[in-house]
Amino acid sequence: MVSLNREKTMYSQKGRTFIVERIRPSGKYGKAYGKCLVDGIPNDEYSEQYDSEIMDGEIPCARCGGWVLIDVPGVDMDKLFPYRPPKFVMKFGKYKGKTIREIYKQDPKYIFWLLDKDYYFRVDFDKLLNIPPNFPNRQSIIENEINRVFPKTKADDLITFGKYYGKSFREVFMEDPNYIEWFLRNNRTLELDLDSFVAMIKQNNADSNG
């Protein structure tokens, strides 16, 4: 199965997807044939819109959009696209010649960036993070690692933009609470540790009422 809506449709089965049953290579693109599904259910309405174009199940506009391979019946995708161990040596990119472990120690964000850009470049994070087999807290370890690599902004962190550059959010809140309230309502760029901001506001209210 392939999808025009990439990851959002790949797992949720929401939106329009296609089961490609066969392809006919021709020139740069070729043609694809199969069935249309809407929200995971076979749907002929899409095909009816293109009656004059469709012949024998042809998928219109198959040469455009972001098609993503999801599964090939009868093929073990883990063998086709294996999980790379930490000792795997990169054969491309700016870290060509280094192992995944070496890269992760130097620039862990690069590995996450690569995973996001290439769905089928998969890394064995259990081995990379030394997680024992069947470890019960595996998910929490991975989540903690993601938070370490991509730390959330906390109330005591320094502001790196605007008129209060160099001051902490807490310092600014004590001086200009309206600015922090505006920031919390309008922030679209920073991943925030909201618990720390809520605690800051509650503590300030408690101090004021005390």
Image: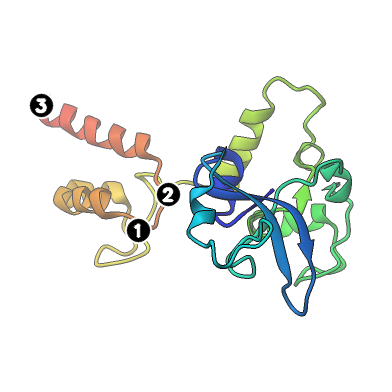
Q: Are marks 2 and 3 in contact (CB under 8 Å)?
A: no
- Local crowd size for mark 1, using a 10 Å CA cut-off: few (<14), some (14–19), many (≥20): some
Q: CA distance from mark 1 to mark 2?
A: 13 Å
Residue 23 shows in the view: yes
Query: Mark 3 or mark 1, which has the lower sequence index?
Result: 1
Viewer-nearest residue: 62 or 137: 62
Q: Amino acid at mark 2?
A: Glu
Callout 1: SS: loop
Q: CA distance from mark 3 to mark 1?
A: 28 Å
Rendered position, 51 above or below 70: below
How far from the left and from the top, in percent, is residue 76? 86, 41
How far from the left and from the top, in percent, is residue 180? 22, 50
Residue sitting at the far left: 209
- Local crowd size for mark 2, using a 10 Å CA cut-off: few (<14), some (14–19), many (≥20): few
How far from the left and from the top, in percent, is residue 178? 14, 50
How far from the left and from the top, in percent, is residue 80? 87, 50
Viewer-nearest residue: 79 or 86: 79
Query: Mark on residue 159?
Result: 1
Residue 148 shows in the view: no
Q: Amino acid at mark 1?
A: Ile
Residue that carries the numbered disc 2 in the rendered image: 191
Callout 2: SS: loop
Residue sitting at the far top: 136
* Left or right: 170 in relation to 114: left
* Left or right: 141 in relation to 127: left
Residue that carries the numbered disc 3 in the rendered image: 209
Query: Mark 1 or mark 2, which has the lower sequence index?
Result: 1
Q: Residue at x 28, y 46 (%)?
A: 170
* Left or right: 128 in relation to 177: right
Callout 3: SS: helix
Q: Residue at x 75, y 22 (%)?
A: 135
Q: Quadrant of the C terminus?
A: top left
